[in-house]
Amino acid sequence: MSTTKYWVQALKTAKKNFNKLFHKEAIPDRRFVDNKFGKYEVVRPWQVSDQNTVPAYIPHPPYSKYMQLNKGLLKPEIKNENQIQCMRDSCDMAKEVLSQAKQFIKPGVTTDFLNDKIHEMIISNGAYPSPLNYRGFPKSICTSINNVACHGIPDNRPLLEGDTLNIDITVYLNGYHGDCSDMFVVGKADEEANRLINITDLCLWEAIKTCKPNENFSSIGNIIEDTARKHGFNVIPALMGHGIGNYFHGPPDVLHFANNKPGKMQPGMTFTIEPCLTQGDVEVEILEDGWTVVTVDEARTAQIEHTILITQNGCDVLTFK
Ligand code: MF3
Ligand code: CO
Ligand code: CO
């Protein structure tokens, strides 16, 4: 190699490493597809800014400082009136914040900006944004775009016209978590994206309709998979709903695919249903950041989530407006 060539190469490498280390212009290679799934960007992580802080006077969940998780409940908890009221309050706030998020979504806005706005809203209401530091998660909400199935980390990528975006918000209030997510389109999206979102919503609500005392938890997955397939979509089996309470995730696992796992719903149980449907195959992978879940075939996905309470004669959707 000539001396000049050597230095050009060396400088390139140095610059690349500098950018990596100091998070300058860390823009990944961008790729747009126009195929049977639609016309969209295959999204990869961009640059993540520093963590937001939560004032000390706001009660923090136990995992926020030490990596301590819940003390392993073995079966779904039956909540008393007090605990149910706490769940109602945290879920009310989660749904209110999620509905406020909508106003900020437009082309050019970054998910980092959405994270900051929502973080502010949550702490100004006296709650803690549950994802922050949960198993080391670096931000206050999850934002998952196009081929990102879930757990996307807010970053400095500006939203593009036609993006499909999931915002997942969980708040910790009075010692209890409330968890919900919804899909948004940036500007206008293509026909298939809208159909995917509508069918995901349909699947969730078909499942919710079956929820009542003595119903099998497996009914949820059976109806979701059935409904998704009827409309030509697949359910990503790796992504499950969960029991929720003074813990973020606990029993039961709520499977979204056809199954006959034992377990029945009882009054006082609270859990999430959060099906994630894909236009393509069900395989997903986790990227090097340890969080971002993407589809292997780069198909787009949609996920919508509610927290449910089983009542004496049916269920309440605690995060429904
Ligand atoms: N809110 C997500 C769920 O529905 C969990 C996010 S965990 C995080 O279960 F650490 F990624 F925030
Ligand atoms: Co969630
Ligand atoms: Co959840």
Image: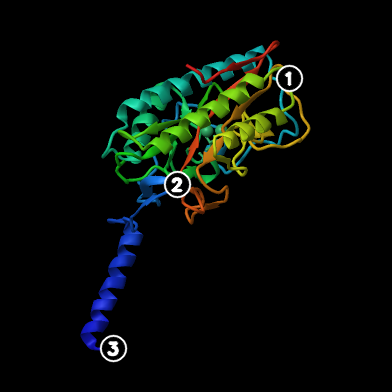
Label 1 – label 3 distance at C-alpha: 73 Å
Q: Earlier in the sequence, mark 2 or mark 3?
A: 3
Where is residue 87 shown, x and y percent of the image? Answer: 58, 19
Query: In this view of the protein, which residue sits in the foreground, 259 or 52?
Result: 259
Query: In this view of the protein, which residue sits in the foreground, 160 or 141?
Result: 160
Q: Look at 51% across and 18% down and name the residue there.
A: 320
Q: Residue furthest left?
A: 4
Assign ligand 3 to one image quadrant.
Answer: top right
* Mark 1 or 2, closer to the camera: 2
Colour convention of the picture? rainbow
Q: Would you identify the image quadrant in which residue 318 lies?
A: top right
Q: Look at 33% across and 55% down and name the residue there.
A: 30
Q: Can the viewer see residue 132?
A: yes
Q: Residue furthest bottom?
A: 2
**Circle 3 crowding by C-alpha within 10 Å: few under 14, some 14–19, many from 20:** few
Label 2 – label 3 distance at C-alpha: 41 Å
Which residue type does callout 3 highlight? Met
Which residue in the protein does label 2 denote?
A: 147
Q: Earlier in the sequence, mark 1 or mark 3?
A: 3
Establish whether ligand 1 lies closer than 8 Å to the Cβ of label 2. no
Q: Can the viewer see residue 60?
A: no
Where is residue 257 shown, x and y percent of the image? Answer: 65, 38
Would you say 293 lies left or right of 108 here?
A: right
CB-based contact (under 8 Å), mark 2 and mark 3: no
Q: Would you identify the image quadrant in which residue 20 lies?
A: bottom left
Which residue in the protein does label 3 denote?
A: 1
Would you say 127 lies left or right of 222 here?
A: left
CB-based contact (under 8 Å), mark 1 and mark 2: no
Which residue type does callout 2 highlight? Asn
Q: What element does badge 1 sit on?
A: loop
Quarter of the image with the N terminus is bottom left
